[in-house]
Image (spheres, rainbow, N blue to C red):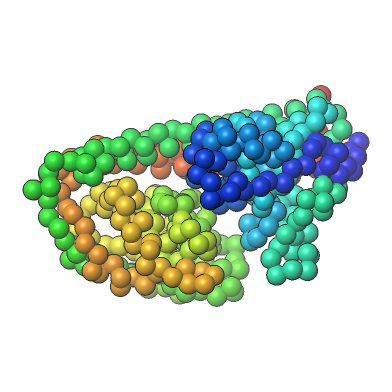
């Protein structure tokens, strides 16, 4: 029989702290510094990659907030409240994250899945804080109560079933990162650091591409269970790449130039964060199977230059990063697409572009297959999650 317990009864509660950014000696080591923006989505498992790291000296100054491996982190402020992850190694978080260092009576993976399943509750509690920004303080976080399976062996059995899916997803994600790194390294070797500058041509983007704007939609047009696929800002990964899980359904009108197909190149023109993770970033449309339309947060880029090369140029040739600096706005960043017209880029000879595409295209095809497999695994895991955590599916210790 399940027992209601506070999160503080499952382990030690730790709120993160940001080391002084004015002291460079505290930064740049091997200790991950986890922030809400590092946690890519609500189904992140282990959080291994972070934008910033802390030095050994910086970590030594943070003994009270150091998290051992297998700690469960939860974002507790802002619009992305309730995002969980697990630490792979000794880590530090910022103050927007509360973490649980599990005690010996509880399985860390079980706690992670408990948090995952309780996302609506976290968002409700955070929204009821009375402030303009959703927030769950350390004290409130520690006092939150949940129905807990008290039998550690059963916790481990439930967690093992679910984590089998996440392990496969994680392995596929590692293969994706490796393939992307290979494509990036080849691009930089051939183009960014090449000796072909005398053969290259400087052109304006306006001379090689055009763009089509996505459509604006109302809440009623996406409040549907079936319809066309709406590719939107959530389909753009941070700093480039495509996310299958961001797609919405749309039952409104559209123009033919707003339809995208496999191989099309899209760019984000808005950003909900101030660190410019999606604005100016690009993605290649995978095999989406259904009629797909882009939202107003995106533009479709069209060119007689192969999109595989253009994607690499924007993402790894620092073109996206440069473009993102033209976006502005107080809370939401907006990029006016017409600023692309006068931006200059260097194009290598066409035979070299074709050779690069012939090598990299198969890598991208494999990435698309791995992403599709992960999407399927995610759906299977998410179907099991509530049934296992609620006890509807009984497991034996």
Residue drawn at the location 78% of the way across and 42% of the way down: 13
Q: Quadrant of residue 296?
A: bottom left
Left/right placement of residue 40 relative to residue 361 reads right
Q: Quadrant of residue 148?
A: top right
**Count of numbered tags:** 0
- Quadrant for the C terminus, please: top right
* Observer-nearest of 342 and 44: 342
- Quadrant for the N terminus, please: top right
Q: Is residue 266 visible?
A: no
Q: Is residue 16 visible?
A: yes
Residue drawn at the location 37% of the way across and 39% of the way down: 180
Q: Is residue 332 above or below residue 57?
A: below
* Observer-nearest of 267 and 328: 328
Q: Is residue 130 above or below residue 99?
A: below
Q: Position of residue 47 (x, y in %)?
A: 58, 39
Residue drawn at the location 81% of the way across and 27% of the way down: 104
Q: Position of residue 33 (x, y in %)?
A: 57, 42
Left/right placement of residue 261 relative to residue 387 reads left
Residue drawn at the location 48% of the way across and 63% of the way down: 271
Q: Is residue 54 above or below residue 234?
A: above
Q: Is residue 122 above or below residue 213?
A: above
């Amino acid at each position: 029989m399940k027992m209601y317990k506070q999160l503080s009864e499952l382990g030690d509660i730790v709120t993160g702290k940001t080391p002084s950014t004015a002291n460079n000696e505290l930064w740049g080591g091997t200790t991950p510094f986890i922030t809400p923006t590092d946690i890519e989505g609500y189904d992140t498992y282990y959080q291994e990659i972070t934008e910033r790291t802390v030095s050994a000296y910086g970590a030594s100054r943070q003994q009270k907030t150091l998290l051992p491996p297998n700690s469960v982190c939860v974002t507790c402020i802002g619009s992305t409240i309730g995002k969980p992850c697990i630490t792979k190694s000794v880590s530090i978080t910022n103050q927007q994250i509360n973490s649980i260092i599990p005690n010996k009576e509880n399985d860390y993976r079980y706690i992670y899945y408990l948090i995952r399943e309780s996302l609506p509750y976290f968002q409700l509690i955070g929204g009821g804080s009375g402030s303009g920004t959703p927030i769950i303080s350390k004290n409130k976080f520690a006092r939150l109560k949940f129905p807990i399976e008290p039998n550690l062996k059963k916790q481990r059995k439930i967690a093992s079933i679910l984590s089998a899916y996440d392990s496969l997803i994680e392995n596929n994600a590692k293969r994706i990162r490796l393939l992307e790194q290979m494509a990036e390294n080849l691009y930089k070797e051939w183009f960014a650091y090449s000796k072909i500058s005398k053969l290259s041509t400087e052109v304006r983007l306006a001379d090689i591409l055009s763009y089509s704007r996505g459509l604006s939609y109302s809440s009623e047009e996406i409040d549907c269970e079936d319809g066309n696929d709406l590719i939107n800002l959530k389909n753009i990964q941070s700093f480039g790449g495509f996310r299958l899980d961001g797609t919405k359904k749309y039952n409104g009108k559209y123009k033919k130039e707003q339809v995208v197909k496999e191989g099309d190149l899209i760019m984000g023109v808005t950003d909900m964060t101030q660190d410019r993770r999606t604005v100016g970033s690009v993605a290649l449309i995978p095999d989406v199977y259904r009629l797909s339309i882009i939202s107003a947060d995106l533009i479709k880029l069209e060119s007689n230059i192969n999109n595989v090369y253009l994607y690499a140029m924007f993402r790894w040739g620092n073109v996206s990063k440069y473009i993102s600096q033209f976006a502005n706005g107080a809370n939401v960043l907006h990029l006016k697409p017409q600023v692309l017209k006068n931006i200059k880029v260097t194009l290598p000879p066409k035979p070299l572009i074709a050779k690069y595409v012939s090598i990299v295209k198969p890598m991208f095809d494999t990435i698309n297959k791995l992403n599709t497999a992960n999407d399927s695994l995610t759906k299977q895991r998410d179907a099991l999650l509530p049934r296992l955590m609620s006890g509807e599916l009984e497991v034996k210790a």
